[in-house]
């Protein structure tokens, strides 16, 4: 087995289309992990192997791969660059000790690279930057480097220098190797010397002793520079910039070398902490093979042959195949069979895994994402993984009865694989709702329903859970009389309907005196009223915030029954609501929108156009947080529209606040649609 000091775990992040996956395919080929270089365009990538990924040519789910090279074991995680699948990238951050941000040499730093950098920065992970596609037309290395420095900061320092441009781009040279620079000529030599000096200065600034020596005019040795550079990278003080072309495999060997030489082993990484429950304090976990076993589950996937695979990062100790572990989160013991390390869609069986490894096991019964697993008696638990909230929802309706039987099982499996995909049954509208991070996210999930689970669905916009109420008090009679030979039906009640304050719900009061309505029929009247309230009187939505009083009525000794009084109560209620100035109430949401400063004008204008009220603003780093209250009906497509307004840089979340009056014009439109649908049902 590889010693923990020789293990590396690294996650690749970047904008969709920047070439992260192509870089990993080139690394696997260069290191001998693949006999031929995989290609995203040709559908032969070791990372993007799903049918939906091959057809779209984008990474949709994170992948775990590995190489063994120069006596080191490198775990490499590929993540989606598209915002709709950001949950994968977030969970991967918990499994790695370092990251590589891939930047497109044509477009420079894009929003996907910014978001990936933010995730790495949030955990203070050491990181490298790789400028890709320098062989492509319109690539501009100087422009890309400038965008890196302006976006990520001055601590991003060039480690390699590209020779040639676009189609003439042929190699990269390491700036710490002075002998190579001395062989250059002309503008290349002049530029390389300038970048080398900047690199040396940046390295010296990470170490007080070296800085004093550098400022004193002394020349720093290669050993001093390399040693200080590694320390600076591991402490996240300096971020080396490398460059190349994944497709032409230029700069890939130097990238592998940089991962091995500069990025930390688990022993040098930011210490992983866990909460010790009994003391309610954080403890640092020592990444030693001899320590007790502990790990965090950060991913789950469904393999067509093996079934569900649970993937975890080992932080301490050793776990053997055909043994067991204790699930600290669920407080239960799990037996395990064969352990695997992953190579994309392939699994390599191993007898044991230890600190620094990323491993998988099949068919666990209880263990799922974010669970802490360890040995019996483990008293600490890792911080749970917090996923982004769903931003968009659709209603789904199975196309056939056969699909109805299968859909809930299928949705549960999709949720276990991707926790950012949610499903629920809306109690008021009776709709089955699926929710995700964006349009593309839900499209992919619906395609998986069809292709993987053979479930066909119709999609629609979710119904808004409006409610009905009244504005004034009325008194109304409900009389039900039916005679059709033999015993008839007779029920007669007088009701008073009164509005209650918002949140008043429902109150039923019995003021019958003298037995004009026998006591045994009063509950039936209330039942009829409650049923009518659920069905709604003007637009089919539940009625709320109302007091109903029964104060008079009559009965028949033979023909009266509970059913007759139930119908009479329902009739009186529906007729009374129509005369009591009925209105619709709409759900209003508390919305928190996080956007860059330069988009604030567009955002505030858009909130006003959605009938929203801005409740406050505050700064959060480089962004602004806008707090507003907006009707839910205006938020159904907001995720897509916010992305457009902010070029993908905005985010939001919302939660229910309260109900308030729906504007008359919108109410009239909703009532008209309801009456039209009822008429259509009658005609059918």
Image: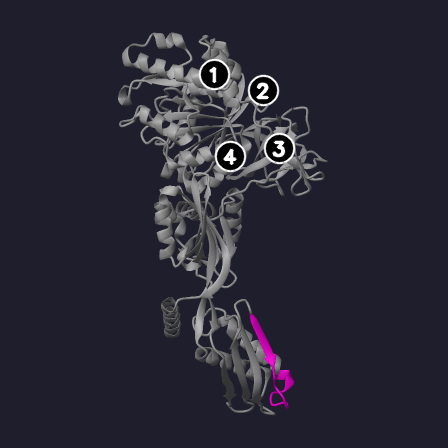
Tag 1, which secondary structure?
helix
According to the image, label 3 marks what residue? 273
Marks 1 and 2, the one that precedes in the sequence: 2
Sequence-first disc among 4 and 3: 4
Left or right, 341 with reference to 605:
right
Contact? badges 1 and 4 (CB < 8 Å): no
**Residue topped by disc 2:** 5
Give the distance between the C-alpha atoms of the residues marked 1 and 3, in whole angstroms.
Answer: 31 Å
Q: Sequence-wise, which precedes: disc 1 or disc 4?
A: 4
The quadrant the C terminus occupies is bottom left
> Please, is residue 366 above or below residue 284 in the view?
below
Is 510 inside the magenta-drawn segment? yes
Give the spatial CA distance, label 4 vs label 2. Answer: 25 Å
Q: Are marks 4 and 3 in contact (CB under 8 Å)?
A: no
Say if residue 566 shows up in the picture: yes
**Can residue 174 be seen by looking at this rendering?**
no
Magenta part of the chain: 505-521
Colouring used for the render: one colour
How far is disc 4 from disc 3 in space, using C-alphas? 15 Å
Q: Which mark is residue 204?
A: 1
Q: In which quarter of the image is residue 180?
A: top left
Q: Earlier in the sequence, mark 3 or mark 2?
A: 2
Query: Closest to the observer: 118 or 313?
Result: 118
* Residue at image point 58% right, 91% down: 556
Instruction: For the N terminus, give its image quadrant.
Output: top right
Residue 405 percent location from the top left of the image: 51, 56
């Amino acid at each position: 087995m590889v010693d923990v000091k020789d293990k590396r775990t690294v996650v690749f992040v970047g904008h969709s289309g920047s070439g992260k996956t192509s870089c990993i395919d080139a690394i696997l080929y260069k290191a001998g992990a693949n006999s031929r270089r995989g290609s995203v365009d040709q559908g032969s990538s070791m990372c993007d192997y799903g049918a939906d990924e091959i057809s779209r040519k984008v990474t949709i789910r994170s992948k775990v791969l590995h190489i063994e090279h120069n006596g080191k074991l490198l775990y490499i995680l590929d993540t989606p660059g598209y915002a709709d699948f950001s949950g994968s990238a977030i969970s991967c951050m918990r499994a790695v000790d370092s990251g590589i941000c891939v930047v497109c040499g044509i477009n420079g730093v894009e929003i996907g690279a910014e978001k990936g950098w933010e995730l790495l920065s949030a955990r203070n992970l050491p990181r490298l930057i790789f400028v890709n596609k320098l062989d492509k037309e319109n690539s501009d290395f100087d422009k890309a480097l400038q965008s890196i420095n302006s976006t990520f900061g001055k601590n991003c320092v060039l480690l390699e220098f590209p020779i040639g441009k676009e189609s003439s781009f042929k190699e990269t040279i390491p700036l710490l190797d002075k002998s190579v620079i001395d062989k250059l000529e002309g503008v290349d030599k002049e530029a390389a010397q300038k970048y080398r000096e900047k690199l040396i200065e940046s390295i010296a600034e990470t170490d007080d002793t070296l800085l004093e020596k550098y400022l004193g005019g002394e020349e720093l040795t290669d050993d001093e520079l390399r040693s200080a550079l590694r320390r600076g990278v591991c402490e996240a003080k300096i971020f080396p910039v490398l460059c190349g072309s994944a497709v032409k495999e230029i700069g890939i060997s130097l990238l592998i070398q940089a991962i091995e030489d500069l990025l930390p082993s688990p022993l040098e990484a930011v210490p992983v902490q866990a909460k010790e429950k009994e003391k309610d304090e954080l403890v640092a976990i020592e990444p030693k093979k001899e320590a007790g076993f502990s790990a965090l589950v950060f991913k789950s996937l469904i393999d067509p042959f093996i079934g569900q695979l649970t993937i975890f990062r080992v932080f301490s100790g050793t776990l053997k195949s055909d043994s067991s572990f204790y699930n600290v989160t669920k407080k239960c013991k799990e037996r395990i069979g064969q352990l695997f390390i992953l190579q994309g869609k392939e699994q390599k069986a191993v007898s044991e895994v230890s600190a620094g490894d990323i491993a998988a096991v099949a068919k666990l019964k209880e263990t799922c994402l974010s669970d802490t697993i360890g040995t019996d008696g483990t008293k600490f638990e890792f911080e749970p993984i917090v996923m982004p909230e769903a931003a968009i929802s659709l209603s789904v309706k199975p196309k056939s009865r056969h699909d109805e039987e299968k859909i809930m099982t299928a949705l549960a499996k999709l949720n276990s694989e991707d926790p950012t995909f949610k499903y629920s049954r809306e109690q008021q509208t009776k709709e089955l709702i699926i929710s995700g991070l964006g349009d593309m996210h839900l499209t992919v999930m619906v395609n998986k329903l069809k292709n993987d689970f053979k479930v066909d669905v119709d999609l629609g916009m979710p119904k808004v859970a409006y409610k009905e109420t009244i504005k004034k008090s009325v008194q109304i009679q409900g009389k039900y009389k039916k005679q059709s030979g033999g015993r008839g039906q007779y029920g007669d009640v007088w009701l008073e309907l009164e509005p209650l304050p918002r949140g008043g719900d429902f109150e039923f009061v019995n003021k019958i005196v003298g037995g004009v309505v026998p006591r045994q029929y009063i509950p039936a009247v209330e039942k009829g009223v409650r049923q009518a309230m659920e069905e709604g009187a003007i637009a089919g939505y539940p009625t709320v915030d109302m007091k109903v009083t029964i104060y008079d009525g009559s009965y028949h000794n033979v023909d009266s029954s509970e059913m007759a009084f139930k119908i009479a109560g329902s009739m009186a209620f529906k007729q009374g609501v129509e005369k009591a100035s009925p209105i619709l109430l709409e759900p209003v949401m508390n919305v928190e929108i996080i956007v860059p400063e330069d988009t604030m004008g567009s955002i505030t204008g858009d909130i006003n156009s959605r009938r929203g009220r801005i409740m406050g603003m505050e700064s959060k780093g480089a962004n602004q947080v806008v707090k507003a209250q907006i009707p839910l009906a205006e938020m159904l497509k907001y995720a897509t529209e916010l992305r457009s307004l902010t070029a993908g840089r905005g985010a939001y979340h919302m939660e229910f606040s309260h109900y308030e009056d729906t504007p008359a014009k919108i109410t009239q439109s909703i009532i008209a649609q309801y009456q039209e649908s009822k008429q259509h049902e009658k005609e059918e």
